[in-house]
Amino acid sequence: MSNPVLSDTGAARAAPVHPTQRKFKRRSKRMKAMLPYLLVAPAVIYLLLITLYPGIFAITQSLYNVKFGPWQWVGLGNYAKLWSDYQFWGALWNTLVMGSISLALQCVIALALAFYAYRDPWVRGWRIIFLVPMLFMPSAVAFIYKLAFLDGRVIADLLMKVGLVDGNIAYQSSTWLSRMILILADVWQWTPFLFIIFVAGLQGQDEEVEEAARLDGASWYAIFFNISLPMMKPIIAVALILRAIDITTMFTNVFIITKGGPAFGTETISYFIYRTGFKFFNFGYASAASVVMLIVTIVIAQSIVKRAFVSARS
């Protein structure tokens, strides 16, 4: 004789599912799959509006002679004019020189600070102090350095008191001295940015590899240069690319401290675009310079990052 409980259970299992329930399950699966995309959609749309549209507008504007009045089609005329513009190439060279020196100093200082903050307990306890310069507004830092080197003569007076110089230093009459002020201001404020990334990279490495090297008798410096530093190549490359892209937009310090002088010796590409667009109101020509600078930045950044990741894998 069969058990009625088992018979009822088998009948319940064999009962067909209603079509409405199947449709609801399919919709719930679709909603679960689409939910991540729906959540990030507003941010993606916002980023496209503030990046894609201005980029397309700048490319379109670079093909016209845009001043006050109707746009005049010039095709690649603005780009051809850039090719023979010595001020554009001078601004590009100034950006490359000051950016390279500033980036090299920031990388060395940030690596040294990250090494000691990662190893030395005393330095590790005070590493929050290293982040203070990054908390200042760029305009405030620019005014501080302008006051110290130019308007207030603070640095010159200190050098006179210790007997290193006999009088005031004419920073604005020397291209390299003016560049030095801009480089020091940039290094002082943005080295903490690289410091944070490098410390995070060191803390994320496998401790067992370092422990094995330490048991073999390797010193801290040998471990850092032979193990930690090679493992951090991709991180260093990405961090330097981010800073390099930001350095190409160096504008605040130039605008407040040097105004691009002396004789365009400190004019960066960002200040050249500003001067062309908002002083001479040649917006098409300024857009062409922006497009060229964007292409150069993307090509250099892509090549450096690709080489760094390939070397790290090998």
Image (spheres, rainbow, N blue to C red):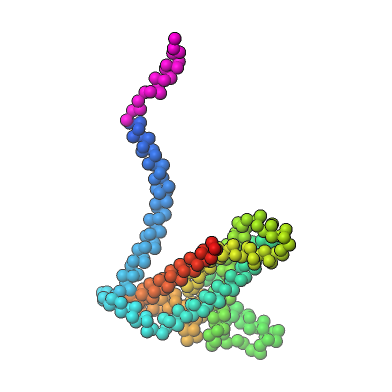
Specify whether 12 is left or right of 111.
left
What is the count of numbered marks?
A: 0
Q: Residue furthest bottom?
A: 166
Q: Which region is colored magenta?
A: 1-19
Q: Is residue 116 visible?
A: no
The quadrant of the picture occupied by the N terminus is top left
The quadrant of the picture occupied by the C terminus is bottom right
Residue 190 image offset from top left, x and y in percent: 56, 68
Q: Is residue 91 magenta?
A: no
Q: Is residue 3 magenta?
A: yes
Q: Residue at x 61, y 68 (%)?
A: 110
Relative height, residue 76 to residue 35 (above, below): below
Q: Residue at x 39, y 48 (%)?
A: 38
Which of the two residues, 78 or 238, is positioned nearer the viewer here?
238
Q: Is residue 23 visible?
A: yes
Which of the two residues, 174 or 247, is positioned nearer the viewer here?
247
Residue 173 image offset from top left, x and y in percent: 54, 88
Q: Residue at x 70, y 87 (%)?
A: 163
Q: Residue furthest top?
A: 1
Specify whether 205 is left or right of 33.
right
Residue 234 image offset from top left, x and y in percent: 54, 63
Relative height, residue 262 to residue 25 (above, below): below
